[in-house]
Image (tube, rainbow, N blue to C red):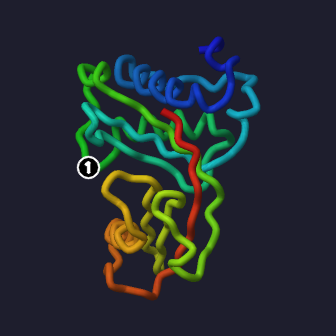
Amino acid sequence: MKDALKRGGGSVYPELARRAIEAYIKEGRVLEVPDTLPEDFRERAGVFVSLKKHGQLRGCIGTFVPSTGSIYEEILRNAIAAATEDPRFPKLEPSELKDLTVSVDVLSKPEKISDISELDPNKYGVIVSKGFRRGLLLPALEGVNTVQEQLRIAKMKAGIDPEDKEVEMFRFEVQRYK
């Protein structure tokens, strides 16, 4: 892994996520955080790790604001969670690893918006919030082509009535690494 880390940058984010998943699923081991990390891994940001098997979603877990000290740690935590804690799927089995594709999205800091005209489902992800309920949808998702559809799905994920117009909205951008 050290050689991969020396290359730096986002191109190795999915590789790190895959290694974290494999170590955990095969050995029950969490990868250690090296003492020194390249600059791209030391930054703090929200990170989503998405898993697909034969092109179909198999797990996706993330944070929209950083919950650890670095992108490296965020990737480790969310990769394992995507493989083992996504409530929509059973825990990943070792036999599935060979068919798994992994992508990592690094999120910008969410910014509050006041009007849906400030959204674009291909460019921005969205967070909707009402009281303690919150839903997030990443940008550029297959089948989500309109702002209205993006908001409807995010509200449903939050348990908010899709017709409710009284929600706070935030947008964010992502850098997607495959």
Residue 166 position within the rendered picture, expressed as x and y whole percent measured from the top left:
46, 88
The percent position of residue 94, horizontal first and vertical second, equals 28, 21
Closer to the camera in the image, 46 or 177: 177
Q: Is residue 167 above or below residue 151?
A: below
Instruction: Report crowding for label 1: few under 14, some 14 to 19, many 20 or more residues within 10 A (C-alpha).
Output: few
Q: Quadrant of residue 47?
A: top right
User: Where in the figure is residue 99, as x and y percent of width and height?
Assistant: 28, 24
Relative to 94, does residue 110 appear above or below in the rendering?
A: below
- Figure check: 9 above or below 1: below
Q: Look at 34% across and 51% down and name the residue there.
A: 142
**Residue at 53% in and 36% down:** 177
Horizontal side of residue 99 vs 101, given as left or right = left
Front position in the image: 97 or 91: 97
Task: Identify the residue shown where x is 32% and y is 79%.
Answer: 162
Residue 84 screen position, x and y as percent: 34, 37
Q: Is residue 108 left or right of residue 28?
A: right
Identify the element where label 1 is drawn.
Answer: loop
Residue 163 relative to residue 63: left or right: left
Please give the count of numbered marks on the rendered protein.
1
Give the quadrant of the N terminus.
top right
Which is nearer the eye, 118 or 54?
A: 118
**Residue to which mark 1 is pinned:** 88
At label 1, which amino acid type do we have? Arg
* Residue at the image point whose x is 65% and y is 14% from the top: 2
